[in-house]
Image: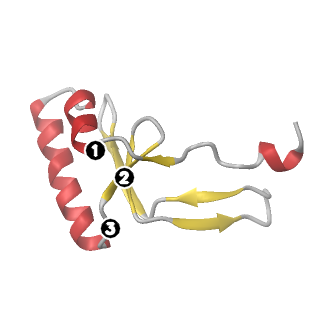
Amino acid sequence: MPEAQRNVLKTKVHDADVLAFIESFASTDQKRQDSLDLIALMSKVSGYPPKIWGASMIGFGAYHYKSEKSRQEGDWFLVGFSPRKAAISL
């Protein structure tokens, strides 16, 4: 595989339904409510709507980065979270 392909981030934003994701992924009522509260807060603060990134992250906004050191580049969200099994990760 060429070096340029190895250094591209594979996690991408897509058009999955954020609320359907929360309903299916959050394992408890508390995690579901906390996720909805985080969506409201992060939307308000960032000014961007929530989008699903990869399989389990909710991100707001985006920026493009390019690292001189690792030669990796890609797009990533400005702020976000994931309602993981053990705990929510910000």
Q: Residue at x 23, y 32 (%)?
A: 26
Amino acid type at mark 2: Lys
The residue that mark 1 highlights is 18
**Which comes before the other along the chain, label 3 or label 1?**
1
In this picture, residue 45 sits left or right of residue 82: left
Asked if the residues shown at circle 2 and circle 3 are in contact, with their CB atoms under 8 angstroms apart, the answer is no
Q: Compare residues 63 and 67 and report the one nearer the observer.
A: 63
Asked if the residues shown at circle 2 and circle 1 are in contact, with their CB atoms under 8 angstroms apart, the answer is yes
Q: Compare residues 69 and 14 and report the one nearer the observer.
A: 14
Q: Compare residues 9 and 51 and report the one nearer the observer.
A: 51
| Cα distance in 3D space between marks 2 and 1 | 6 Å
Give me the disc on residue 70.
Answer: none
What crowding class fits label 3: few (fewer than 14 Cα within 10 Å), some (14-19), or many (20 or more)? some
Q: Residue at x 78, y 56 (%)?
A: 70
Q: Quadrant of the N terminus?
A: top right
In percent of width and height, residue 79 lies at 39, 62
What crowding class fits label 1: few (fewer than 14 Cα within 10 Å), some (14-19), or many (20 or more)? some
**Which comes before the other along the chain, label 2 or label 1?**
1
Give me the disc on residue 51.
Answer: 2
Residue sitting farthest toward the right: 2
Dot 1 lies on which element?
Answer: helix
